[in-house]
Every structure is written in C-alpha cells, then in structure tokens.
Image: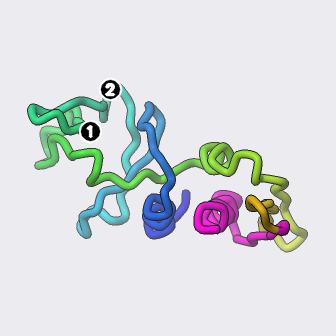
Amino acid sequence: MIDIDVARRLRDAGLAWEPADGDRFALEVEALREETFMLASMVIERGVGRTGVELFRFNGTTEWALDAVEREEAIWVPREDQLREALGAAFRALRREEDGTFVVTVLPAGGAEREVRAPHAEDALAGALLLHLTG
C-alpha cells in the first residue's frame, strides 16, 4: 500500500477518484493517520448527507465516535491495479530487478521514456503516475 503522503500528492496533482466498493482511503486526521479504511457495502458505504454532500457512512461501529465523513475529508489510497489503469497509455513496463527493486517505465506525453524505481511495485507505479500527472 502506498504512503498517505504519496496518495495526497497524487490527489493534489489531479488524480480523479470515483469511489467504489473495495477502494481504500485514509482520513486527514492526525489520530487516524496510520489507519486505512475500505469501502464495502456492509461496513463503509457511500451516501449523501442532508446538504447534498457525498458521505462515507461507517456501519456497525457503535464503539467509534465516527459515524460518517465527507468525501472531501478522505484521501484515496489507490491499489496497484488502479495506479496502472490511471497511467493508461503512458505505462510501458513493470519489472523486478535482481535486487528486488521494482522499476516502472513510462512514456509521458511528448517526452522521453523514464524509469521510476522503488522497493514495492505500488510505490514505483505511484511515482510514475506522479511524473505523468505533473509533466
């Protein structure tokens, strides 16, 4: 799973999110910084508040003081497949080096091929997506 700071940078760079079951997200709350949540119809489901704001409702969490959060308070933490999909045609390859490092090759629009290295495939894909989104 990518770090919340990287997820925040992806969001700030313009990565769009259409929430769906199975998506992971974190909250902009220091006390919950290390926690990730997953949208699932039985546990956390999407809804709309009285003012029309999209919400994530936490079901069956009577021990929590957290009943619902607004979507804007959530930071999407995309999975490996979602990162690869977001790269689209810019994605060229993902390989694992002998030392265990993962390398993603991307071809940004109008640019030369670039490689991003990281200890995990998701991290390399996230770095490549940041390059792609920020030019």
For the residues marked 1 and 2, what is the alpha-carbon distance in whole angstroms? 12 Å
Q: Is residue 128 magenta?
A: yes
Looking at the rendered image, the quarter that the C terminus falls into is bottom right
User: Which residue is the site of mark 2?
Assistant: 42
- Badge 1 amino acid: Phe
Q: Closer to us: mark 1 or mark 2? A: 1
Question: Which of the two residues, 51 or 70, is positioned nearer the viewer here?
Answer: 51
Q: How is the image coloured?
A: rainbow
N-terminal of the two: label 1 or label 2?
Answer: 2
User: Which residue is the site of mark 1?
Assistant: 56
Residue 75 position in % (x across, y down): 38, 55
Residue 120 position in % (x across, y down): 68, 64
Q: Residue at the spot x=71%, y=46% of the render?
A: 88
Q: On the image, which quarter does residue 132 sit in?
A: bottom right
- Badge 2 amino acid: Met
Q: On the image, which quarter does residue 42 sit in?
A: top left
Residue 101 position in % (x across, y down): 78, 70
Q: Residue at the spot x=81%, y=62% of the render?
A: 105
Residue furthest to the top: 41
**Start-end of magenta stretch:** 112-135
Residue 108 position in % (x across, y down): 74, 61
Q: Is residue 118 magenta?
A: yes
Near mark 1 (Cα within 10 A), the count class, few <14, some 14-19 or many ≥20, is many
In the picture, measured across the screen, residue 65 lies left or right of residue 106, that is left
Q: Residue at the spot x=22%, y=46% of the render?
A: 70
Near mark 2 (Cα within 10 A), the count class, few <14, some 14-19 or many ≥20, is few
In the picture, measured across the screen, residue 73 lies left or right of residue 119, that is left
Q: Is residue 100 above or below residue 89?
A: below
Q: Is residue 23 above or below residue 108?
A: above
